[in-house]
Amino acid sequence: MNKTTYKISHFNNELKVFKADKKEIIFSSFWFMEFGKTCAEIKNHKEEHIYAVTKKFQFWKWRMVYLIQDKDAKKSILIAKNNRNTIFQIEIDGANFEIKINYKKKKSIYKNNVKIAEVDENLSEENFITLKTTKEEELKNIFLLYTCLLIGKNHENSSTILTSQKKLESNNEPWS
């Protein structure tokens, strides 16, 4: 199983994903406050708008929800599957995607219950986040899911503050 490595830069309220050589931006996203809601826009390398995301908190269910609209006005919902907000699920084009927040600043992304990507937020020597994937064609969806989880955080407070690592999901298939 071949893994392709990408680099992600996180500065203030903006993310950019690059090929491993860090020369060409593939996707970018930024988030902002609008009428009391946190919103994000995701663009491709040509600066074309591909997704709009609105982050909401459902008080009655005590979980996060992300309302996603693509460039064709098709809507999807990324929703937390537990009240700890460590497992999120969405259906995109008939496939089920899931993202899990793991121990040691890692996130695992699954498509139809098969792990397709892992994000390692332990910054490398160049201050980049590492993204490894076995499905390059799913990079757009992987970046969408990762962006959703970072909406509202800047690079200075991007670490999750929890009282215990026990509240995170175990990484049953670590890649690094």
Image (cartoon, rainbow, N blue to C red):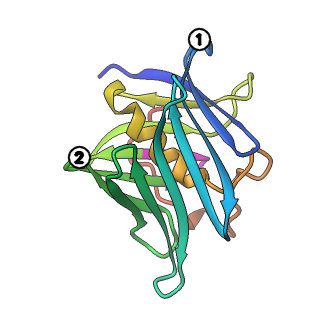
Badge 2: residue crowd in 10 Å (few <14, some 14–19, many ≥20): few
| Residue found 62% across the figure and 40% down from its top | 121
Q: Is residue 7 above or below residue 93?
A: above
Q: Element under label 1? A: loop
The three-letter code of the residue at mark 1 reads: Asp
Q: Is residue 165 left or right of residue 172?
A: right
Q: Element under label 2? A: loop
Give the number of the mark in front: 2 or 1: 2
Q: Is residue 158 magenta?
A: no
Badge 1: residue crowd in 10 Å (few <14, some 14–19, many ≥20): few
Instruction: Determine which residue is flagged by label 1.
Output: 21
The three-letter code of the residue at mark 2 reads: Asp
Q: Which mark is residue 171?
A: none
Residue 120 appears at what percent x and percent y?
Answer: 57, 37
Compare residues 62 and 114 and report the one nearer the observer. Answer: 62
Residue 142 appears at what percent x and percent y?
Answer: 42, 39
| Residue found 66% across the figure and 62% down from its top | 34
Q: Is residue 107 magenta?
A: yes
Q: Main secondary structure of the magenta part?
A: strand
Bounds of the magenta span?
104-108
Compare residues 133 and 163 and report the one nearer the observer. Answer: 133
Q: Is residue 107 above or below residue 11?
A: below
Instruction: Determine which residue is flagged by label 2.
Output: 93
**Residue 158 visible in this rendered orientation of the protein:** yes
Q: Which is nearer the N-term, disc 2 or disc 1?
A: 1
